[in-house]
Image (tube, rainbow, N blue to C red):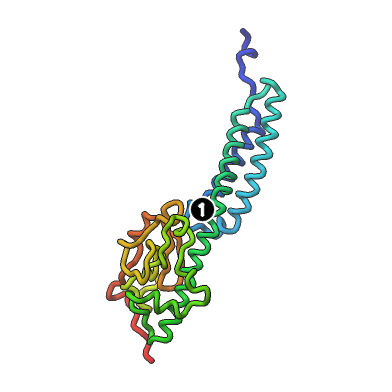
Amino acid sequence: MSETENKKPPISKLAIASLLVALTGLCFYIPFSPFCSYDHSEFVNIAGPWIAFLSILSGAALGIIAYNHVRRKKGIIRGRIFSISALIIIASIVSIALLSVDMIPDLSRCGNNLSRLGKAFLLYSYNHEGKYPNAGKWCDEIAKYLDSPVKEQFICPAAIKHRDKGRCHYSMNPNCEPNSPPDTVLLFETKGGWNQCGGPELFTVEHHEGQRAFVLYNNGDVKLIKSEDIGKLKWKAEANEVNQPASR
């Protein structure tokens, strides 16, 4: 058998390109998938979604073209496995995106609820000499400072889907005061109840997919965190971290 006959057919560059483009789309999709809660750089926040979208479209088109090209050559060139892999990656990304569409409204509403509750806490403190409500009655007190519909702002929609039908799915950290550090936990997700207060022992990550939950910080910021980050949260300020209230 001659050396020419032993030589394997070359791999289609188009097939390789389709796989590389598909992998690029996957890399830029992951930070924005519903299962990722990490902070992103400014570049990723701005360019990431566009790069992911264009890569997915380009990868799908290249994969189909490459597959048909290799098939027509009938052994003259190789690369079918590369084009098929690219199409599988693209199909997986699209499937995950479609399956998670119903999660986005729940995440948005839950985060918005905590943001509104945070504004209500701020209004309460303005009217009560710079103090937050008693932790054992916070739901009753804060409800007076919420716009209608009041009941919905205490409820996490995802919790309802998990058959947790309590009146309120958030708990107050009793160690947080208006003069506590900005990154101190004020409210966090918990199982259904009313006027609940406490610390990490009440924290739940069972409402949202990916073992995650929202936290409202003392400065009004709302963040979605993973279960492994609960231990990193600030629940009580050190003596030298407490800001002195402004004189009136």
Where is residue 80 drawn, in percent x and y?
63, 28
The quarter holding residue 187 reads: bottom left
Considering depth in this image, is 68 or 216 the residue closer to the camera? 216
The quarter of the image holding the C terminus is bottom left
Picture layout, residue 247 above or below residue 82: below
Looking at this view, name the residue that lies furthest to the top: 1
Considering depth in this image, is 164 or 227 the residue closer to the camera? 164
In this picture, residue 25 sits left or right of residue 213: right
The quarter holding residue 94 reads: top right
Considering depth in this image, is 190 or 12 the residue closer to the camera? 190
Picture layout, residue 106 above or below residue 98: below
The quarter of the image holding the N terminus is top right
Give the structural element (helix, strand or loop) at label 1: loop
Q: Amino acid at mark 1?
A: Pro
One can see residue 184 in this view: no
The quarter holding residue 200 reads: bottom left
One can see residue 223 in this view: yes
Which residue bears the numbered disc 1? 34
